[in-house]
Amino acid sequence: MSYSVLFVCLGNICRSPMAEAVFRDLVKREQLDKLITVDSAGTGDWHLGRPPHEGTREVLDRYTISYSGMKARQLTAADGGSFDLIVAMDTRNEQDIREKLGLSAKAEIIRFLSLLPESGIIDVPDPYYSGNFDEVYELVKDGCIKLLEKVKERLDNGR
């Protein structure tokens, strides 16, 4: 059994690639990289083919988390059938994902911070506008830890 996770934000250069890299790092540390695949995408097309934002790269470098080979891509209708779980970084992107994929998508779609209800925050702030990549990293790190627990349970239960 395998499990696949797709993180989605607006441009796929700040939040979702940060989540992809952090989650991929956790998965690798748990030696689950043969069972769990991880990717990220954006709902918009402004940054296609670009590497993660400099602020995202700086934070990931500080924590020695690899983002090697990552390039921005846009969410496609096929993603709804290719992934088990699609994780939206905010409410607006969650709505856009649901509109793009429609009801036929097999993927479960959740909002990232639903994993951290204790945070009291609904949406992961967009550091492209705020510049606060450290705040986003802390939310992403904590959320990815919770997400990995959830995915491991699903793998143990056969879904």
Image: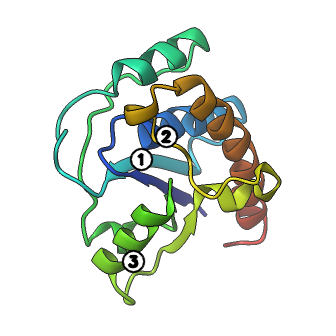
The amino acid beneath tag 3 is Arg
Percent position (x, y) of residue 108?
A: 54, 74
Percent position (x, y) of residue 3?
A: 56, 60
Is the N terminus in the top left, top right, bottom left or bottom right quadrant?
bottom right
Mark 1 burial class by Cα count in 10 Å: few <14, some 14-19, many 20+ = many
Percent position (x, y) of residue 150?
A: 74, 59
**Is 27 placed above or below 79 here?**
above
Q: CA distance from mark 1 to mark 2?
A: 6 Å
Which numbered circle lies on residue 91? none
> Badge 1 is on which residue?
39
Q: Earlier in the sequence, mark 1 or mark 2?
A: 2
Residue 16: image quadrant is top left
The amino acid beneath tag 2 is Glu
Q: Which residue is depicted at the point 33% across and 35% down? A: 13
Say whether residue 82 is left or right of residue 63.
left
Mark 3 burial class by Cα count in 10 Å: few <14, some 14-19, many 20+ = some
Q: Which residue is depicted at the point 37% across and 70% down? A: 97
Q: CA distance from mark 2 to mark 3?
A: 20 Å
Is the C terminus in the top left, top right, bottom left or bottom right quadrant?
bottom right
> Badge 2 is on which residue?
20
> Badge 3 is on which residue?
98
Q: Earlier in the sequence, mark 3 or mark 1?
A: 1
Q: Earlier in the sequence, mark 2 or mark 3?
A: 2
Residue 154: image quadrant is bottom right
Say whether residue 133 is left or right of residue 100.
right
**Is 151 placed above or below 104 here?**
above
Percent position (x, y) of residue 49?
A: 17, 36
Q: Which residue is depicted at the point 53% across and 26% down? A: 132
The amino acid beneath tag 1 is Asp
Q: Nearer the viewer, mark 2 or mark 3?
A: 3
| 3 and 1 marks in contact (CB < 8 Å) | no
Q: What secondary structure is marked by label 3? A: helix
